[in-house]
Amino acid sequence: MKPRTFGRHIRESFKSLGRNGWMTFASASAVTVTLFLVGVFAIIMMNLGVLANNIEENVEIKLTVDPAANEEAVEQLTAEIKAIKEIGTIEHATKEEELNHLVSTYGDEFNLFKMSNPLGDAFYIRTTDPLDTPKVSKKLEKLNYVSDVVYGEGTVEKLFNVVQISRNVGLILIIGLLFTAMFLISNTIKLTINARGTEIEIMKLVGATNSFVRIPFVLEGIWLGILGAIIPMTVLSIAYHRLYAWLSPQLKNEILQLLSPSPFLFQLNGLLLLLGVLIGVWGSFMSVRKFLKV
């Protein structure tokens, strides 16, 4: 296609948006509302995903060593723990460190044990895949010199199930919302094109090719997608920045955290803009097809 012809298509697409002001407004509004809902839901699901990952990564196994185990036995146990392939990190705490932690947590009355420490060494273990925690715990229980293995049995399994269900439900809802958006916007654009059916038919009758007729409408779909994405991108960016500034200082827990605005908002805005353009192009392309069969 010649540059002059393409330039004409661009000019015609802008003129058409102006001539069909109310339909342009309706189409762009449909894009705006839909992409705003997609953006809000994406923000919620992405932050819930981070929360779920943080919860999983903070699941920890505490292995308590038999107080009767000597130094050689502890070294042997350490080697056996490291040999388990699913294990990611291991932190060893001596029985003196365990007693100091107990005193700092529950009070000085536990200082009575300083003279005769009844505690054993402990290992704090995290698996490479948090879902392997129950399986690894069972392996650890079978090792020699192990007094106790604790990881929140029962509660952790339920937590993993809730996290997995929330991820699956979120993915299904996002896909459903995107299909709803495509259907809604396609129908809105179709109304715009239906109102200009006679114009398209005349162009076909005087010899215009399908691509010549289609390109201005596809360009209109692109402009509608961009117009419809601008408001959601702006509103959600401002709202998220304010929410992050207000809420982050109050979420001092390492598990409860919001995604940092950068680069999250850049990625979200890029996604919304791309979705707007793709949906606009798809809606225009599909809607103009029936008028090309003249």
Image (tube, rainbow, N blue to C red):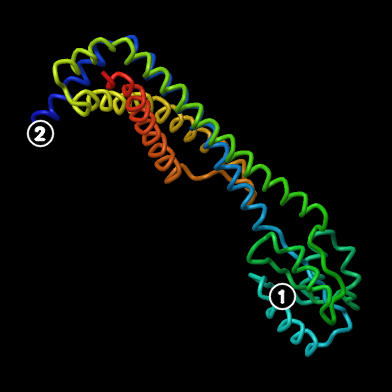
Left or right of 9: which side holds 139? right
Label 1 neighbour load within 10 Å: few <14, some 14-19, many 20+: some
Q: Mark 2 is on which residue type?
A: Pro
**Residue highlighted by disc 1:** 92
9 versus 67 height, above or below? above
Q: Tell which tag, 1 or 2, sits nearer the viewer.
A: 2
**Residue highlighted by disc 2:** 3
272 versus 20 height, above or below? below
- The C terminus appears in which quarter of the rendering? top left
The residue located at (33%, 30%) in the rendering is: 281
As rendered, which of 174 and 198 lies closer to the eye?
198
The residue located at (40%, 17%) in the rendering is: 188
Left or right of 264: which side holds 190? left
Splitting the image into 4 quarters, where does residue 202 fall?
top left
Q: Mark 1 is on which residue type?
A: His
Q: Callout 1: helix, strand or loop? A: strand
As rendered, which of 168 and 289 lies closer to the eye?
289
Q: Give the x, y percent position of residue 2.
A: 9, 34
Q: CA distance from mark 1 to mark 2?
A: 70 Å
Q: Point out the tag, 1 or 2, that comes first from the N-terminus.
A: 2
216 versus 45 height, above or below? above
Left or right of 74: which side holds 202? left
- Tell me the number on the disc at residue 140: none
Splitting the image into 4 quarters, where does residue 140 fall?
bottom right
- The N terminus appears in which quarter of the rendering? top left
Q: Callout 2: helix, strand or loop? A: helix
The residue located at (37%, 26%) in the rendering is: 283
